[in-house]
Image (cartoon, helix red, strand yellow):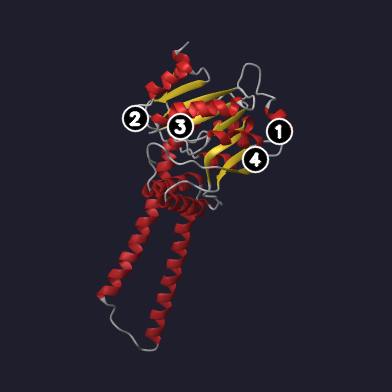
């Protein structure tokens, strides 16, 4: 334990905080004061300086005035306000880009990610491991939410040909090296776990306690989770295109088989006039496949179009640190 604490106390540089905690804010305004207090207690208890970055992703409960109030009371808190709702992972990216700490923690704002577990995640970072993810052994979510999460990660894993653990999410600690690498990735479609995995740095899973949601409700429905899995797969994998190609080969094999069967019937004299139903079914089958293939290609072209526009991943409207200067 003493060795771990000495590693943490090395700091991140003169005048800079040891730890940055990035929190995307959406729909949990009543949790922010308690979250700031508990983060301060968790990190002050192990002697680390820190900054807490609240990123208001155009929260529907008007969180920005509350964030400004907290920054006036707690100098360690900094607020970023995005010009519109860019999505959770874009908000996280905004926080990572403004984080100054030598180690960075990412967590949700609803207090299900417990601030008291932050030291355990930081202890998981060492010379060998650059990423420490919180593993929620006993999730305090509804059966529907847990089922939706498992389906999301299974669909995402199948589409991207990677293994995912549904007990881990965004809650984790990252070294400065990992965050700098992710900040240098220019793609518009952001998904923190995949970006961190792509860096190739060693990851450690740390068992953590999971709290119950005390306010608000998750904005991720099962439909939105599956849509996000499809979008991420299109951005990070070419498997959908390979699936279309595989299906085309299967249909080609079926077509060749039908042709040989028709020739066989001709040679044995068992020739019948082709029926309207079989012709119509064949047209619908081939036509549907062609349309489906064009649809998948169109989705990829749409993603390429978004990337080639080189629009920013997010737009910071207001920065509490600059407002107080």
Q: 278 or 133: nearer the eye?
A: 133
* Image point (48%, 31%), residue name: 23
Mark 4–mark 1 Cα distance, whole angstroms, equals 20 Å
Mark 2–mark 3 Cα distance, whole angstroms, equals 14 Å
* Cβ–Cβ under 8 Å for marks 2 and 3: no
Counting residues from the N terminus, which is met first, the one under dot 4 or under dot 1?
1
Q: Which mark is residue 4?
A: 1
> Dot 2 lies on which element?
loop
Residue 31 spot, x, y in % from top left: 43, 31
Looking at the image, is mark 4 or mark 3 nearer the viewer?
3
Looking at the image, is mark 1 or mark 3 nearer the viewer?
1
Q: Which residue is mark 2?
A: 61
Residue 316, image quadrant: top left
Counting residues from the N terminus, which is met first, the one under dot 1 or under dot 3?
1
* Image point (34%, 60%), residue name: 288
Quadrant that contains the N terminus: top right
Q: Which residue is mark 3?
A: 24
Instruction: Describe residue 29's horizontal placement relative to residue 47 as left or right.
Output: left
Counting residues from the N terminus, which is met first, the one under dot 1 or under dot 2?
1
Instruction: Point out the residue furthest to the top here.
Output: 325
Residue 158 seen anywhere in this rendered image of the structure: yes
Q: Which residue is mark 4?
A: 201
Q: 166 or 230: nearer the eye?
A: 166
> Dot 1 lies on which element?
helix
Residue 285 spot, x, y in % from top left: 34, 65
Mark 4–mark 2 Cα distance, whole angstroms, equals 37 Å
Mark 4–mark 3 Cα distance, whole angstroms, equals 24 Å
Q: 49 or 243: nearer the eye?
A: 49
Instruction: Point out the residue furthest to the left here.
Output: 276
Looking at the image, is mark 2 or mark 3 nearer the viewer?
2
Residue 254 spot, x, y in % from top left: 43, 71
* Image point (55%, 31%), residue name: 183
């Amino acid at each position: 334990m003493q060795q771990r604490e000495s590693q943490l106390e090395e700091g991140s540089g003169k005048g800079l905080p040891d730890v940055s905690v990035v929190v995307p804010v959406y729909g949990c305004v009543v949790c922010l004061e308690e979250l700031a207090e508990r983060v301060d207690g968790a990190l002050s208890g192990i002697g680390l300086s820190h900054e807490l970055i609240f990123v208001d992703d155009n929260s529907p409960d008007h969180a920005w005035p509350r964030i400004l109030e907290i920054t006036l009371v707690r100098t360690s808190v900094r607020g970023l306000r995005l010009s519109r709702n860019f999505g959770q992972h874009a908000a996280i990216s905004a926080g990572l880009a403004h984080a100054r700490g030598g180690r960075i923690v990412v967590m949700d704002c609803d207090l299900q990610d417990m601030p008291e577990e932050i030291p355990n995640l930081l202890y998981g970072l060492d010379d060998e491991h650059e990423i420490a993810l919180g593993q929620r052994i006993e999730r305090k979510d509804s059966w529907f939410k847990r089922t939706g999460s498992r389906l999301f990660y299974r669909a995402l894993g199948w589409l991207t040909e990677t293994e995912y653990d549904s007990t881990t999410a965004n809650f984790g600690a990252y070294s400065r090296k990992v965050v700098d690498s992710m900040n240098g990735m220019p793609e518009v479609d952001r998904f923190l776990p995949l970006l961190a995995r792509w860096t190739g740095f060693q990851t450690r899973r740390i068992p953590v306690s999971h709290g119950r949601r005390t306010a608000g409700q998750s904005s991720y429905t099962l439909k939105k989770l599956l849509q996000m899995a499809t979008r991420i797969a299109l951005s990070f994998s070419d498997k959908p295109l390979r699936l279309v190609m595989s299906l085309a080969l299967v249909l080609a094999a079926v077509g060749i088989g039908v042709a040989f069967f028709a020739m066989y019937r001709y040679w044995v004299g068992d020739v019948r006039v082709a029926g309207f139903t079989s012709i119509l079914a064949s047209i619908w089958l081939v036509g549907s496949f062609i349309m489906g293939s064009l649809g998948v290609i169109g989705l990829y072209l749409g993603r390429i179009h978004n990337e080639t526009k080189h629009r920013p991943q997010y737009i910071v409207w207001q920065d509490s640190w600059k407002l107080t200067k």
